[in-house]
Amino acid sequence: SQAGETSGINLAGGPFRTPDHVAGGNSTPFEILNEDGDTGNWERTIGLYRTSDSYITQSRGWLEDAHGGIIWFGPYAAPYSVFVPFAAGMKSLPHATLGNHMRLDKKTLFWAFRYLGNYVQNKYEAMMGEVTAFQQHAMQRSLELQASIDSLMNGGESSDSVLELYSANANKVLEETWEFSDHLMFKFADGQVHATPTDVQYGTSTPPRKYSVKGVTTKEAPIVDQPGYRTEWLEKVGFLDGPPPPPNCEDLDWQCGHAPSSSSVSNSGLRSESTKDDASNNASTQAWIVYIQGKERALRSNTVTCDAVGDVAAAVKKCSPRSMQNIVQHVLSDSPVQSNGGGQKETGRV
């Protein structure tokens, strides 16, 4: 494969090595690439991304035709699809089997799998492991359903009602595919890997965050991981020629949300609470005071949301729309920032 482990041009798959490549069309700038006059091509994968559907027919001559003949129907590209069974004797098929690329219809398997297949491109290698597990789970359930239906049919049950169980199974796969896509969206959003609860099949939340005494989020890899990109890919795309890294908090001083190093910080847990003496009246401290005043005005006027309060809300542990007034009263319980008439300024609790 052009994106495989042994390929000399594995950049083709991007940092996460997807095998899918859209057709170049008129935007491909090359006219002649080799001596044969070929203008270049991507390999055509077996599970081509623009597949409308694929299927497997299962003929079981030892059973009655109504339930012996099965078609395993896989809408969209096979790598991202789930093959769902339908019997030859079914009088109708569910709406979920419809769907095409000309009209978005989230009630169809085609669009559920197309959505999944397109989102997986963002982090192909990491996500495909979960996609495969999801497919295996759905396939196992369909095989168990097929065995159950065969047993019911052989026992003389009405074919119409029994075979409708295949439609219910297809609708269940449709519902779970959208839940699974939401799970992947949450877990792999913005290049991160978020931990999800183990007691929920397709979780869309992380465990509660923990905070330090200064109200700063404590880094815990099991909650949020930032794996980044492969080293070999970064080297080939010019990452090492990029700009220098951003300065750290020690360099930024108060701009990181901490008091200037010349200030003495109290032990109350709010990282903006500090006292300043005359000796700290320098440019950094003056900028810090302006910063504190801005935060205090926002809190006093109640014009910010809980999210905007940030470290203050985290430290007092009372962040919710209903308790915003309590936060303001608690935070402003000391004297506000004000001028003392001598050019110096004092901070209250912010």
Image: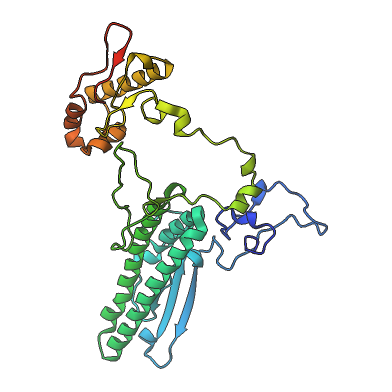
Seen at 38% across and 76% down, the residue is: 140
User: Which image quadrant for residue 254?
Assistant: top left
Seen at 42% across and 49% down, the residue is: 189
Q: Point out the residue furthest to the right here.
A: 35
Seen at 37% across and 21% down, the residue is: 288
Q: Please state which of residues 262 and 7 is positioned toward the viewer in this rendering.
A: 262
Above/below status of 172 relative to 245: below
Query: For this view, does 74 lie left or right of residue 328?
Result: right
Res 107 visible? no
User: Which image quadrant for residue 162?
Assistant: bottom left
Seen at 72% across and 56% down, the residue is: 40
Q: Please state which of residues 310 and 137 is positioned toward the viewer in this rendering.
A: 310
Whole-percent x and y of residue 81? Answer: 45, 66
Query: For this view, does 323 lie left or right of residue 226?
Result: left
Quadrant holding the N terminus: bottom right
Whole-percent x and y of residue 138? Answer: 38, 71
Q: Please state which of residues 218 and 321 is positioned toward the viewer in this rendering.
A: 218
